Amino acid sequence: MAVYTHLSAENLSGLIAHYDVGELVSAKGIAEGVSNSNWLLETTGPDAARVDSPHGSARYILTMYERRIKIGDLPFFLGLLDHLSAASLPVPRTIHDRSGAAFRMVGNKAVALIEFLPGVSVDRPTPAQAHSVGKALAGMHLASADFAGTRENDLRPSDWQALLGQYTDSQLAQIDADLPEFIEAHLPRLMAAWPDDLPQAIIHADLFPDNVLMRGNAVSGLIDFYFACKDMAAYDLAVTHAAWCFDRTGEHFDAAVGLALLEGYAAVRPLSAAERDALPILAQGAAMRFVATRAADWIDTPGDALVTRKDPMEFARRLTFYAEHGAQAFTI
Amino acid sequence: MAVYTHLSAENLSGLIAHYDVGELVSAKGIAEGVSNSNWLLETTGPDAARVDSPHGSARYILTMYERRIKIGDLPFFLGLLDHLSAASLPVPRTIHDRSGAAFRMVGNKAVALIEFLPGVSVDRPTPAQAHSVGKALAGMHLASADFAGTRENDLRPSDWQALLGQYTDSQLAQIDADLPEFIEAHLPRLMAAWPDDLPQAIIHADLFPDNVLMRGNAVSGLIDFYFACKDMAAYDLAVTHAAWCFDRTGEHFDAAVGLALLEGYAAVRPLSAAERDALPILAQGAAMRFVATRAADWIDTPGDALVTRKDPMEFARRLTFYAEHGAQAFTI
């Protein structure tokens, strides 16, 4: 959470002059996004010059892509926002510049101007909120069917294996003494059992509560699509389940939140029997995906860095839960 | 620049329920404030419940005081905002809770809700912008005359001496080989020449461009009053001059910006002959104040920390400029 690059008011004003959004009124660097810098901009709005709307005002998120995200993937990510927004999903649209471009370069970094959506991210979702999130996720899967873009998932089971394979057991054991054995006990088993014939969609793949904006029990925004890719729709539901239905540590599963999420999803996009049957394995895989990326981040981040490292064991606990109680957890 | 504390949407909603500002619509942690955490909040507004204003919306800055600022000083700082705002200066007012309190405690930390003002901070002020800032600063000095609160300046020449006296010459020389000699050459001289009979006011004492919000050439906000105190009005003008009239490194003085700042100030609050005569010394002192605090921060911050250290020598160069050209720079 940081703003990695300084953009002066003069830089920002020069940048938005390429867009039909009016003049800059306010700019605040915001503490969101791990691999991006973000600013909340207020402008006089696209209609500012109109006599009947002299006091217009509009808000946007300006994102600068600092690392991790490949510029070649931006047309997919930004086009997906436009596609989902046009399908009336609560997804911010990309503001295009006057030449029609979805992103521009500032120095050697890409920036995009994105619609601001109201709402707040909840820390402890209620069942009613999880129900809304399930519906929104299913709506996204359905609406993505006619989206022309595609992107491969670069965090599939073989990628988890490659990621974890970079480290020795003794490096992994420094995170937690049980971690090497845990990976050995579960990863080969999950890779062997991983389904490959379930219905696919464009999936969000990272729909944690901080990537959902809510107003009361309603979803007002799905944001941060920078892991979106084509993969099994039910896997996305499993990722969302792992992200929404436990306390942070992964020690406590909230069955009511879990059931509401599944029911909300199925109300919009009914699950096939094969998808239902696969959910326990998919959820264990979802947990392993975060064990793998968190373990890599942990080892690559010095312990005395100011960045807070996220504990991989929080997702190891979820995996254990799904291995033991998955069938039950996914019975609607 | 960071958000040091996590406040959940649930925490924030609970907090603002104590204020007459409506319901929470949006909350973004913002990258402002070195010793505070700040959030930009949007609410449905105080009139949200009124039938004739169903779509009200209002914005506020929520500040959590993390360190440095003493809770005992908050009534002064927050009362000053209210006083200056009531005097029609572009200063954000404090939003008081329903019991009338200017701040509340969240755990062991104080928080205040402050009016949001539009505008952006410029990096390279123009003469027209500096003129506006001079006028706003003078207006603040005049309006503070009937403010009941007061606070001693804890960064006077003897404080600079005490701060620098904590470090050995070899520690200071690690910042810059010339720094120990520079301090020895100037600090005793400035302390001996420091005036004590100039008109006093409540001064901002830290009015850098990032503490001023502008819309075009107009000042839309003076913010971050957490160094405000009672001291010589002309010293505040000298601090502002040192902050606005040089490039970042202190190598290049912009005479047109300097002249515009002085003229803007004097147009609202004419300077006495004694104040004019003292400006070269006061400006050297202003520069030494930032040499002292930046040197202390430099030595106290590890070189490999993620926090960017500010180079004290940028203000040593300003001091040298004022020592050599101060009389000229302050001739209107």
Image (spheres, coloured by chain):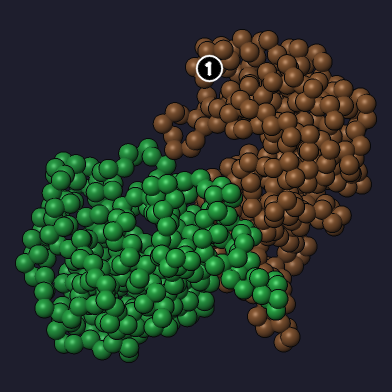
Chain colours: A green, B brown
Q: Is residue A52 above or below residue A10?
A: below
**Where is residue A182 shown, x and y percent of the image?**
15, 55
**Where is residue A13 shown, x and y percent of the image?**
58, 55
Crowd band around label 1 with a 10 angstrom C-alpha radius: few (<14), some (14–19), many (20+): some
Q: Amino acid at mark 1?
A: Asp
In the image, B166 versus A210, the foreground residue is: A210
Q: Determine whether the residue tagged by mark 1 lies in a helix, strand or loop.
A: loop
In the image, B154 versus A322, the foreground residue is: B154
The residue that appears at 70% across and 79% down in the rendered structure is A52
- Specify the subunit that label 1 lies on: B
A103 displayed left or right of B27: left
**Where is residue B236 shown, x and y percent of the image?**
78, 34
Quadrant containing the C terminus of chain A in the rendered view: bottom left
Q: Image quadrant of residue B290?
A: top right
In the image, A45 versus A145, the foreground residue is: A45
Which residue bears the numbered disc 1?
B176
Q: Residue furthest left?
A: A192
Q: Image quadrant of residue A258?
A: bottom left
Q: Image quadrant of residue A232?
A: bottom left
The residue that appears at 21% across and 65% down in the rendered structure is A153
Q: Is residue A224 visible?
A: yes
* Number of marks in picture: 1
Q: Is residue B43 visible?
A: no
A101 displayed left or right of A158: right
The residue that appears at 42% across and 42% down in the rendered structure is A306
A240 displayed left or right of A153: right
The residue that appears at 64% across and 53% down in the rendered structure is B120
Q: Is residue A156 above or below residue B290?
A: below
**Where is residue B301 shown, x and y percent of the image?**
50, 30
